[in-house]
Amino acid sequence: MNNINYEIDPKLKHLKNDELKSLIRKYYTNENIETLIEEYKIDTAPNELYLLLPTWLYKDVFCPKCHRPLVTGRKPGDTTSLDYNQYCEICGHTQTASSIYQSNSDKVDSNNLNNSNYEVNPKLKHLTEDEINELMRRYYSNEKTASLIKEYKINATTSQLCSLFPPKICEDMLCPNCNTHMIVDRQPKTRVGYRTKPYCYKCGHTDSASCKCKTCSEKRKAAQQKEKELRLELEERKRDLINKVYSLHDCVPIELKDLTLRDRLYIGALLRLALSEDMQYIQALNSIEGELAPTVELSEDILTTLKNKKIIAIHPNSDIKSFVEREGVNFPYRYYIYDVNYHLNVGEHCEKDNVFEYLLNPPDLSSFDNIMVRPLWKEIAIAECLQYLEYQMKKVSFEFSPGEKTISLLDNFLNDFSISQVYGIIYKGVTSATRYYQEKSVSKLQAANSVIGTCQRYAEKAMLTGWDVPKYSRIFDLPQTVISEFFFNKMLKIGDEGFNSIPRKL
């Protein structure tokens, strides 16, 4: 009642909400009123107790002026039936509980019924129109249903009587399909004020967006078909625009001889991972299994480098959804790099077989290429060490975001240690920080910040004392990525030595 500013009677304010509910329940289950007054310590006469009880809120009946729920006073005696006037506590508007059913449009109108071809229920056909109206009036005035059935000689049970009544005719609502008045089924008197949807007696149309009548179903089907056609037309225009902007005829091929060792590593790994079955394009990385590189940063750098050097180009067969569509963005000039397909823009079309063979099965390295081996080895090694560090930190719930300091430190480690040995140094550092957190009761942030320093001290001490730092194996959760496999197995042809040896020239 608080939502309509209802005030509890002062004589009941000493009662809690649960006590008030209990009092109402006991009052209407015929417990002794004097006993209740004494038990709940209420200062009132027995015949006035019901006047103090909170009003009954109608959640589905609203004031036509204030649009707030109507209420009704509690009845005295041994019944909870609510045929008292309903009223608004804000503006005072009142209406009788039976008024919902007694407006002119509620009465049986033979003309309206004839217009809608409504047939009176066979069990009421022995009654005249006036008798049916009188029967309904008395029913909704709370006369005993069994007595009415007996008096009017109706072959029905008490629960069936209401369903035999003629429906209410909605004078101000016509079916848009049949142009006849809509009707509303009568409700049992226990559901006075409940709203039901009007419907057409002929075609079954209801005044709702989900109407399942034949006409509405056909309209929805036609609208869906129209929407589908418009969507296909829009997609066709988008596809034409993508084909125009990213036409492969505008691509000037890069010659194989112009590719550096880094270029050949990047494109070779990308082809190994994502070349389509028919070898016509490079598939979007988000559409395939496997990881191109150990870190997101290196994966992005590979795609960005190849795209900027025009070694790959956006393929026009990319999914439309892989291009950015939002206000202020010129479609289709922005795209998601992991969602678009790519075109290999190396060599003429007639040379593609030789190009694929050269890039996927690279020849032995030249002396010139060997200059770039160590930097590329370290680049992959740093990425693998960063991946392992982040994995171990996450495993112990340490928040960590590696920056330039961490990358520089790993770069220095790899001057003297292999990837497998740096794994061991990282494991020691994280283990030590975890013990520091558990034993010294420091914060997780402080413990996480101590990891890099611990790794640095351990590595420096190993160098000074000549410790043989143990080599750790790859773990199941972090399988070797494609760029690492391609570089160590196909280009350098050294296999696991790339993981267990210090980065160097060959």
Image (cartoon, rainbow, N blue to C red):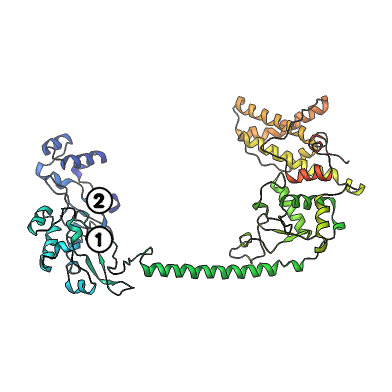
Query: Closer to the N terminus: mark 1 or mark 2?
Result: 2
Q: Residue at x 79, y 30 (%)?
A: 460
**What kind of element bears circle 1?**
loop
Q: Residue at x 85, y 60 (%)?
A: 255
Res. 6 mark: 2
Measured as percent of width and height from the top left, residue 250 is found at 76, 68
Image quadrant assignment for residue 207 = bottom left
Three-letter amino acid code at the position of disc 1 = Cys
**Closer to the camera in the image, 206 or 13:** 206
Tell me: residue 493, above or below residue 167.
Answer: above
Res. 170 mark: none
Distance Cα–Cα, label 1 vs label 2: 15 Å
Q: Residues within 10 Å of mark 1 (few under 14, many from 20)?
A: many
Image quadrant assignment for residue 277 = bottom right
Report whether residue 448 is seen.
yes
**Quarter of the picture holding the C terminus:** top right
Disc 1: which residue: 63
**What kind of element bears circle 2?**
loop
Tell me: residue 276, above or below residue 26.
Answer: below
Three-letter amino acid code at the position of disc 2 = Tyr
In this rendering, would 196 be left or right of 396? Answer: left
Q: Residue at x 13, y 38 (%)?
A: 31
